[in-house]
Amino acid sequence: VAVVLRGQVLRQLDELPQALDQYREARTLYRDSGDRASEARTLRGMGDVQRLQGDIEACLASLTEALEVARSYGDRPGEAAARFSLGVAHDGLGEWQAALDDKAESLRLWREEHNAVEEAGVTASISVTYNRMGQGRDAVRHILDALAMMKAAGTPDSEVRTHLNNAGVIYATAGEFETALRYYEQSLSMGRRLNLPVAGTLNNIGFARYASGDVSAALENYAQALPLFRASRDLVGEAACLRNLARARAQVDGAAVAVPRPSGSAGVSTTGSGP
């Protein structure tokens, strides 16, 4: 157990190679001791780290093995979690139908387990897949269903605020910026209240205001987001924010700049079922 906990802590600290080593050590110990449930959970942890490292082939192999182990002893929650993680991995490959199939199966299993919190999380993740596919109507339907389910199920605000941000991204992608801003503002308020990172949401608010024509407000949001990205060493978020700042400043200076697409990467969650 201590080895798995070290792996989880290292993953949260973005020390991915070390985390993977800890998970591999734990997997060997659990397999040799015959603890199949813990082995399956550890394989899911390995797969998630490999996905974050960009090693999708190894990720899929680990998650497929986790699924097989869970099935071997009738662990339905473990099977549901593995299918969800496989769906997230297929998202990363742009294999949308495979992602939807895995998430739909995860959703079915969680429903059979009467786990409303996980059901809501997977439903929200399905909305992300639909949005990336360009199927905005399906994305909106699923994210609204998910938010209603989260309210009924008592999903923690720390998770709800991520999905509120995702709702904003979905509406921004559809060009409905005023609606997007309402969801972003809710997410921002909740994140600040809980003392959670808000740089991605501030960046998304800036985009929505820029796309709506309020460039000065967008510049303020980007200026607020940039030091937060830097403080958290989020290089991808920092780069996106700098790009957005440059576009907005060019607009102020009178340059002809095309309106960018929504920067969902700073805020879109793919969480739902975890290891």
Image (cartoon, rainbow, N blue to C red):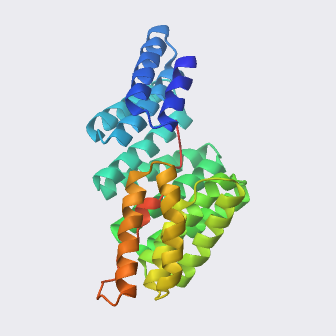
- Residue positioned 35% across, 68% down in the render: 243
- Residue positioned 34% across, 67% down in the render: 133
Q: Position of residue 200 (x, y in %)?
A: 50, 61
* Total labels drawn: 0
Q: In the image, is 208 to the left or to the right of 118?
A: left
Q: Position of residue 47 (x, y in %)?
A: 39, 35
Tell me the quarter of the picture where residue 178 sits.
bottom right
Q: In the image, is 53 to the left or to the right of 275?
A: left
Q: Position of residue 194 (x, y in %)?
A: 70, 54
* Residue most extreme to the top: 33
* Residue most extreme to the front: 253
The one of 73 and 227 positioned closer to us in this rendering: 227
Q: Quadrant of the N terminus?
A: top right
Work out whether 4 lies above or below 13. Answer: above
Visible residue check, residue 199: yes
Q: In the image, is 137 to the left or to the right of 114?
A: left
Visible residue check, residue 261: no
- Residue positioned 48% across, 34% down in the render: 11
The one of 170 and 262 positioned closer to us in this rendering: 262
Q: In the image, is 154 to the left or to the right of 49?
A: right
Tell me the quarter of the picture where residue 66 sits.
top left
Q: Position of residue 238 (x, y in %)?
A: 41, 58
- Residue positioned 70% across, 61% down in the render: 151
